[in-house]
Image: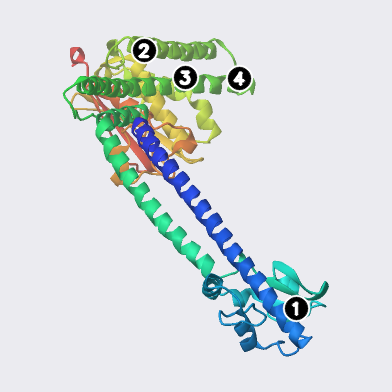
Amino acid sequence: MKLFYKFFFAFCLTSFVAVGLMLLLITINLSTSFNDFVNEAEHKKIADLKSRITAYYQENDNWNELKGNEPLWKSMLGPKAKAGSNKSQSKDDIEADDSLSALSHLLQTQQRLSLYDVDKKVVIGKPLITDNSYSEIIELNGQTIGWISLIPSELAKGSPGSQFLAQQYKSYYVIALIVIVLSFFTAWLFSRHLVAPISSLIEGTYTLIKGDYRIRIEKKTNDELALLSDNVNVLADTLDKNQHSRFKWMSDVTHELKTPLTVLRGQLIGVQDGIFVADEQRVQLFIDQIDSMSHIVNDLYQLSITDVGGLTYKKESLNPIQILLQVADSFTAQFSQKELRVDCSQVAQLMADKKCIVLADKDRIRQLFVNLFENCCRYTDALGQIQISVQIIAKQVHIQIQDSAPGVPVNVQDKLFERFYRVEPSRNRDYGGSGLGLALCKQIVDAHQGTITTSESSLGGLSIHITLPEHRSYT
């Protein structure tokens, strides 16, 4: 839209400047000329009035009769006042005098004139001579006999001259506004017609920049801009697919890198605090966790060279119970820190049961249990408990992991396996989760042709139920 606005505003600015400059020059010229005309007329009126006042004073030798006498004052200002005037006045002078009086009457000059005596005390008009902006001395035979003062028309509030100028200004402003509006409307239509296809492309690409790759640009022409629109649509489709794939595997794998680091750090802190001894078994556990991280990094490399994200699985015959107990043992420090009691007494007896053999990827199964125990440890209240049970039913291995409060409402349990979903307020990001753990668990279980579901736990928390098919060679 920038091109549109540049063109639009350039046209409008030109019109605005031209109209504004013309309006400014007209108003300045009108104001100056009119005020000069009025001031000249008023000064002539003052000169004429001074001769009349001087004649009046010469005849009366004081201002007593005129003091506060409005009718007499008006008669002196009027066109018929001839006191002190020359009787041999020509016809043209009389007409000029009448015109000047008429203009003074129109401008209400009398209301802005004041007369003061020699001591500047008011005879008629404003109480103080300082209330007026212009004053002249009245002299008779070289001696000051008074003062005549005037408030100029342009300084008088509500004077007919000011009202006349205001009305003219208003008319000019209305005309200028109409011209500007018409110019804006013409510029809008012209600019829109020229840049409509470009604006559509600009808006579409701006939407892409914001990360919304679902945008598709409608073609409005059959020229090169149409071809550009097609190319932008292809680009948007490609970005949308790439973004979906990138979010899918980058989020999952990056999240999983934290898990072995957490376990390894917990074990090292335990050794540092004297809880564990750095014996061969413990060191091997450290190595296992480092290997786990190495596997995740390898997965990241494999995913980076594929078009669609997905973990690789190297399946073999194994007993998931053995891995389950190993993972539970690696979380001993975390369980102890929150004083969680773990009950897996009924699980160890199945380690030698051949019916409990499944075809699975050892590392992925370990990831599955690590995620589940991490959730149990993170979201179970202190002094709670975790119960693990395993059953073999209908050629399937059923693994159930239950924890104590807090629980999860039944109406949102189906959403727990959605990516980034968190239950508020008890199971949220404040506990350190990213909302991907259970989503990864479901991905792993689905890859092993199993199922994973949730339900309410008899302990007051959440129950995770996993089923894995038996390895058929042992049935």
Chain-order first, disc 3 or disc 1: 1
Front one among 445 and 242 = 242
For mark 3, does the 10 Å Cα neighbourhood hold few (<14), some (14 to 19), or many (20 or more) residues?
many
Residue 259 position, x and y percent, is: 45, 22
Mark closer to the observer (4, 2): 2
Label pair 4/2, CB-CB below 8 angstroms: no
Mark closer to the observer (2, 3): 2
- Give, as a three-letter code, the residue at label 1: Tyr
Outermost residue on the bottom side: it is 65
Q: Which residue is mark 4?
A: 271
Residue 269 position, x and y percent, is: 59, 22
Q: Which residue is mark 1?
A: 116
Residue 164 position, x and y percent, is: 48, 65
Report whether 231 appears left or right of 178: left
Residue 299: numbered disc: 2
Q: Quadrant of the N terminus?
A: top left
Outermost residue on the front side: it is 88
- Give, as a three-letter code, the residue at label 3: Pro
Front one among 108 and 406 = 108
**Picture quarter containing residue 156?**
bottom right
Chain-order first, disc 4 or disc 2: 4
Q: Which residue is mark 3?
A: 260
Report whether 204 appears left or right of 143: left
Residue at (47% x, 19% y) in the render: 260
